[in-house]
Image (cartoon, grey):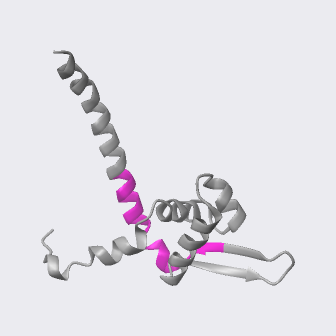
Amino acid sequence: MKKEPEFCQFQEALGILVGKWKPVILVHLLNDGTQRFSVLKRKMPGITQRMLTKQLRELEDEDIIQRVIYPEIPPKVEYSITEYGRSLEPILEAMHEWGSSHVARKQAEEPEAQEEKLS
């Protein structure tokens, strides 16, 4: 992969995906389909309501997800991944694969590092 750094669009892509919660939100929507706000919140117990709202709005602004508001009381809001957002699935899969390999590598290195300390 030969890319000219000054023309590279990695920052644009990372600007959309970076964040502790955005990939998690996307995986939930890709795997489970349309979700209500409260269901997403329950699936991510460590996220605050404010952070979930912020991350969802950012993804919506980029046309990665869509929000549908139903005019009822109390208001019902559902989120789903857009067709355009589905194009991120292979990227998220590749990131998952790389992350899994990285964790396995680090775990394999741990016993070696412990042995070296004991020597």
Residue farthest to the right, as pictured:
73
| Residue 103: x %, y % from top left | 34, 41
Residue 94, compared with residue 75, is above or below; it is above
Along the horizontal axis of the image, is 36 left or right of 113?
right
Between 42 and 79, the residue placed more toward the observer is 42
Q: In the rendering, at what x and y percent does residue 62 appear?
A: 47, 82
Residue in view at x 36 percent, y 45 percent: 100
Q: With respect to residue 65, does 111 lie above or below?
A: above
Q: Look at 47% across and 79% down and name the residue there.
A: 84
The quarter holding residue 112 reads top left
Residue 43 position (above or below residue 83):
above
Q: Which residue appears at 41% of the width and 74% of the height? A: 16
Q: Is residue 87 magenta?
A: yes
Residue 51, horizontal then vertical, whole percent = 57, 66
* Residue 96 % position (x, y): 39, 53
Q: Which residues are magenta?
A: 79-97
Residue at 33% x, 78% y is 12
In the image, residue 30 lies in the stretch drawn in magenta: no
In this rendered view, identify the residue nearer to me: 81 or 21: 21
Q: Judge from the rendering whether residue 57 lies leftward or rightward of residue 34; answer left or right.
A: left
Give the position of the N terminus as an image quadrant: bottom left
Residue lying at the far top in this picture: please name it: 119
Number of dots carrying numbers: 0
Q: Can residue 68 be seen by looking at this rendering? A: yes
In the rendered image, is residue 82 in sight?
no
